[in-house]
C-alpha cells in the first residue's frame, strides 16, 4: 500500500465495513467512465469496415483483422491481469492502461494506412484488457457489501451497453464524417481520464510480491489466443474468407489450455499461479462463470447478427441500423442501477431467474424473423433481449465476485473478463456459421444467397441461440446468493 496518510478507505464503520467516501466514489466513477470508453471501441469497427475497405483498398478478410486482432490481444493480456493487479498498485496500473489506450487511439487517428491502423488497434486493446478486471477488483475492494449490487449494475452497463452502442455511435459518425473521427472524438476523452487518474486515483488493496511464471504466460497466449483466433476463423470460413483452416488454432488452443490448467493447479499450491483456479471451488462463482459464458454468447452473437439482418434482409442503411439498436442499448443502461438496487435488497436470484427467462424468450422470438418482418417487431424483440440481459449480468457479477475472498478477487475478475472474450468470439463464430450454412443450403450456392435465403439463415442462428439461452435458464435455478463470513476459505458453506 502507499505510504500516504490514511484516507476513508482505510477506516471502517461500526458494521466493520470500509467507509465509501468521496475519494473512493471518485475512483469508481473514473474507472467506470474510462472502462465504458475503452470497451465501446471493441465494436466500432464492424460498421466502419465498408468505408475502410474503400479508403484503404483492402478486402473484407484483411479488414476483419481490425476486430480480430483487438479480440486476440484482449484474450492474451486479460489472463495476466490477475497477477498484475496483485503486484502493481491501482494508480500506476490505471495510468498504464489509459496510456496504452490513449497512445493506441492517437496512432489509429493518424494512421497513414492499414498496417499502422492495425498497430493502433492492438495498442488500444492492451489498455482495454487491463481496465475491466481492474474496475471489478477495485469495486470488490472498495465498496461495502450492502452497496455492491448497485455498483455491479453500473459495471453491467459498461460490459453490455458499451459494446451494444458501439455500432450505433459508429454509424452516426460515419454518416457525416471520415472514419478517423471514430478515434479523434475519443482521444481527448481518453487523455482527460488519464490526467484525472494521474492526479486523483487512489491506491487500493494490498500488493504482494509474486513471481511471474514465464511458462504460464506462454501457455495462456497459446491457449486463449488460439481459441479466439480459431473461433473467429470459423465465421470467416463460413463466408469463404478464412486465411487458414480453423481446426489448427483451435486444437492448439485446447491443448495449451489443458497444459495451462494443469500448471496453474500445481503453482497455486504455493500461491504462484498466473490465474488462480481456486476461484472455482466456490460453487456460486463456478455456476456464475458458466452462465456468464452463455449470456456473452447471446449478447455478442446477436450484436453481429442483428445488423446483418437489418441491412441485408430488411434493406436498412448503416445509420438506420444503428438507430434501430440504440433503444435496446439505452434500456440496458437505464436499468443497470435499478437492477443493482434490487440485487442489494432482494438478492441476485430474484433478478437472475426472470432475466434468463426473458433472454431466452427474446432469442426464440428472433427465430420468427422473416423477410419483410415489420420494424416495430424487430425493435420490440431487441428491447426484450436487452431487458433480459440487463437482469442477467448485474446479479452474475454480484454473486460471482461476492462469493470470493479478497485475495482471489483479482483472479476472479480476470477469469470473468477472459470468459467474456472467448464466449463472445464463440457466439459470433457460431451464429455467423449457422446463418451462412443455412443460407447457402436454401440458396443452393454462396453466390446465389438473396434476402430470403439470408432471412432463413438468421432464423436458424437465433433459434440455436434460444436453445443455448434455455440451458442458461436451467443453470440459473442452481445459482445461490453467497453466504460467506468475511475471510472464510473459498467454498465454505457451499
Image (cartoon, rainbow, N blue to C red):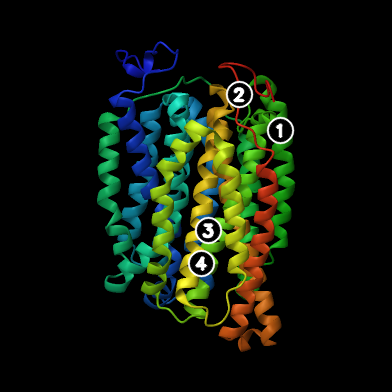
Could you tell me residue 308's position as x and y percent?
Answer: 51, 73
Q: What is the quadrant of residue 371 in the picture? A: bottom right
Callout 4 touching callout 1 (CB < 8 Å): no
- Which quarter shows the N terminus? top left
Q: Is residue 470 above or below residue 128?
A: below
Callout 4 touching callout 3 (CB < 8 Å): no
Q: What is the quadrant of residue 256 in the picture? A: top right
Density class for disc 3 (Cα within 10 Å; few <14, some 14-19, many ≥20) is: many
Marked residue nearer the N-terminal end (2 or 4): 4
Could you tell me residue 395's position as x and y percent?
Answer: 54, 39
Task: For marks 1 and 3, give the one nearer the viewer.
Answer: 3
In the rendering, which numbered label is found on residue 263? 1
* Distance (Cα) linking label 3 and label 2: 30 Å
Density class for disc 1 (Cα within 10 Å; few <14, some 14-19, many ≥20) is: some
Marked residue nearer the N-terminal end (3 or 2): 3
Q: What is the quadrant of residue 50 in the picture? A: bottom left
Marked residue nearer the N-terminal end (1 or 3): 1
Task: For marks 2 and 1, give the one nearer the viewer.
Answer: 2
Q: Which residue is mark 3?
A: 385
Return the residue nearer the eye: 348 or 145.
348
Would residue 248 appear left or right of 133 to someone viewing this image? right
Could you tell me residue 299's position as x and y percent?
Answer: 54, 56
Q: Secondary structure at mark 1?
A: helix
* Distance (Cα) linking label 2 and label 4: 45 Å
Q: Which residue is mark 2?
A: 483
Q: Secondary structure at mark 3?
A: helix
* Distance (Cα) linking label 4 and label 3: 26 Å
Q: Residue, x 30% and y 15% (percent of image)?
A: 4
Density class for disc 4 (Cα within 10 Å; few <14, some 14-19, many ≥20) is: some
Q: Secondary structure at mark 2?
A: loop
Amino acid at each position: 500500500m502507499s505510504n500516504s496518510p490514511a484516507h476513508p478507505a482505510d477506516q471502517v464503520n461500526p458494521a466493520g465495513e470500509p467507509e465509501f467516501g468521496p475519494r473512493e466514489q471518485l475512483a469508481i466513477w473514473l474507472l467506470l467512465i474510462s472502462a465504458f470508453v475503452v470497451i465501446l471501441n471493441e465494436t466500432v469497427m464492424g460498421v466502419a469496415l465498408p468505408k475502410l475497405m474503400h479508403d484503404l483498398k483492402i478486402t473484407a478478410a484483411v479488414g476483419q483483422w481490425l476486430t480480430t486482432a483487438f479480440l486476440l490481444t484482449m484474450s492474451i493480456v486479460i489472463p495476466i491481469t490477475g497477477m498484475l493487479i496483485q503486484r502493481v498498485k491501482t494508480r500506476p496500473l490505471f495510468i498504464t492502461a489509459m496510456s496504452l489506450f490513449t497512445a493506441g487511439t492517437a496512432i489509429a487517428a493518424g494512421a497513414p494506412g492499414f498496417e499502422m491502423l492495425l498497430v493502433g488497434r492492438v495498442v488500444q486493446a492492451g489498455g482495454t484488457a487491463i481496465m475491466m478486471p481492474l474496475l471489478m477488483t477495485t469495486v470488490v475492494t472498495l465498496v461495502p457489501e450492502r452497496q455492491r449490487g448497485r455498483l455491479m449494475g453500473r459495471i453491467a452497463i459498461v460490459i453490455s451497453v458499451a459494446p451494444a452502442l458501439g455500432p450505433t455511435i459508429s454509424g452516426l459518425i460515419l454518416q457525416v464524417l471520415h472514419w478517423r473521427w471514430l478515434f479523434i472524438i475519443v482521444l481527448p476523452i481518453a487523455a482527460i481520464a488519464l490526467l484525472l487518474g494521474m492526479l486523483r486515483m487512489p491506491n487500493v488493496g494490498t500488493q504482494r510480491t509474486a513471481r511471474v511464471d514465464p511458462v504460464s504466460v506462454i501457455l495462456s497466449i497459446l491457449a486463449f489466443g488460439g481459441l479466439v483466433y480459431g473461433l473467429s476463423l470459423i465465421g470467416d470460413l463460413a463466408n469463404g474468407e478464412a486465411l487458414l483452416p480453423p481446426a489448427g488454432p483451435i486444437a492448439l488452443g485446447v491443448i495449451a489450455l489443458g497444459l495451462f490448467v494443469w500448471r496453474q493447479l500445481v503453482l497455486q499450491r504455493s500461491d504462484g499461479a498466473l490465474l488462480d483456479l481456486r476461484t472455482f471451488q466456490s460453487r456460486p462463482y463456478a455456476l456464475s462463470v458458466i452462465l456468464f459464458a452463455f449470456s456473452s454468447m447471446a449478447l455478442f452473437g446477436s450484436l453481429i447478427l442483428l445488423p446483418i439482418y437489418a441491412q441485408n434482409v430488411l434493406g436498412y442503411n448503416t445509420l438506420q441500423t444503428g438507430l434501430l439498436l440504440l433503444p435496446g442499448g439505452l434500456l440496458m443502461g437505464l436499468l443497470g442501477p435499478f437492477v443493482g438496487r434490487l440485487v442489494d435488497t432482494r438478492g441476485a436470484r430474484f433478478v437472475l431467474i426472470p432475466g434468463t427467462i426473458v433472454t431466452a424468450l427474446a432469442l426464440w422470438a428472433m427465430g420468427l424473423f422473416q423477410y419483410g418482418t415489420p420494424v416495430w417487431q424487430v425493435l420490440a424483440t431487441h428491447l426484450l433481449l436487452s431487458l433480459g440481459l440487463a437482469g442477467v449480468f448485474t446479479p452474475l457479477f454480484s454473486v460471482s465476485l461476492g462469493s470470493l475472498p479478497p485475495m482471489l478477487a483479482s483472479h476472479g475478475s480476470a477469469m470473468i473478463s477472459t470468459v467474456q472474450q472467448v464466449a463472445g468470439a464463440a457466439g459470433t463464430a457460431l451464429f455467423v456459421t449457422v446463418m451462412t450454412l443455412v443460407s447457402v443450403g436454401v440458396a443452393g450456392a454462396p453466390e446465389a444467397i438473396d434476402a430470403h435465403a439470408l432471412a432463413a439463415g438468421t432464423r436458424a442462428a437465433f433459434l440455436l441461440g434460444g436453445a443455448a439461452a434455455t440451458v442458461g435458464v436451467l443453470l440459473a435455478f442452481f445459482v445461490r446468493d453467497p453466504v460467506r463470513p468475511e475471510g472464510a476459505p473459498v467454498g465454505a458453506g457451499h
